[in-house]
Amino acid sequence: MVANNHLSRRALLGGVAAVMAGIGLAGPAESALAAAKTYTVGKTTEIPVGSAKMYQVAGVPVIVTQPKKGVFKAFNGYCTHQRVQLDSINGSNLICSQHGSSFNTTTGKVTGGPARSSLANYKASVSGTTLKISL
Ligand code: FES
């Protein structure tokens, strides 16, 4: 009886996986690879060293920083505390003035609360002076 239950459970899980694959629900890694798309957002000259600029990329607010010459970083522009858009920069910190959270301009990690989670990051790339972001 136990063996039958085990087989039934295995068969059921296999059936669920087959259905998910059939309707296009792949595993997380496959989804991320398939979903990544690169967008041209602007020129590198729009973001001097030590500054940041917010772009709307496919409906997503993306804040791009240049913490060091030639190094561009891109993060989701929503504060992880209560989803308000980041609105300023202070030194090496992106600031959400709603409640004062801050995030490192290179890593997106929290440098000051109340936010407790890092900003989601995206791939930023440069071709000549063209800035591209992959979501
Ligand atoms: S929403 Fe940004 S600190 Fe609260």
Image (cartoon, helix red, strand yellow):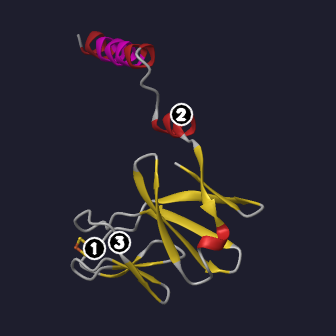
- Judging from the image, what secondary structure is the residue with disc 2 in? helix
Judged from the image, the secondary structure of the residue bearing numbered disc 1 is loop
Q: Residue at x 25, y 68 (%)?
A: 81
Residue sitting at x 45%, y 18%:
21
The answer to whether the beta carbon of the residue marked 1 is less than 8 Å from any atom of ligand 1 is: yes
Q: What kind of residue is marked 2?
A: Glu
Residue appearing at x 62%, y 82% in the figure:
49
The residues bearing labels 2 and 3 have C-alpha atoms spaced at a distance of 31 Å
Please say whether residue 75 is one of the residues in the magenta stretch.
Answer: no
State the CA–CA distance, disc 2 to disc 1: 30 Å
The furthest residue to the bottom: 91
Element type where label 3 sits in the image: loop
Q: Does residue 50 appear left or right of residue 125 in this picture?
A: left
Report the quarter where the N terminus lies: top left
Residue 58 in the image: above or below residue 30: below
State the image coordinates of residue 13 (x, y, percent, origin top left): 35, 19
- Disc number placed over residue 30 in the picture, else none: 2
Identify the magenta region: 7-17
Residue type beneath disc 1: Ala
Residue tagged by mark 1? 115
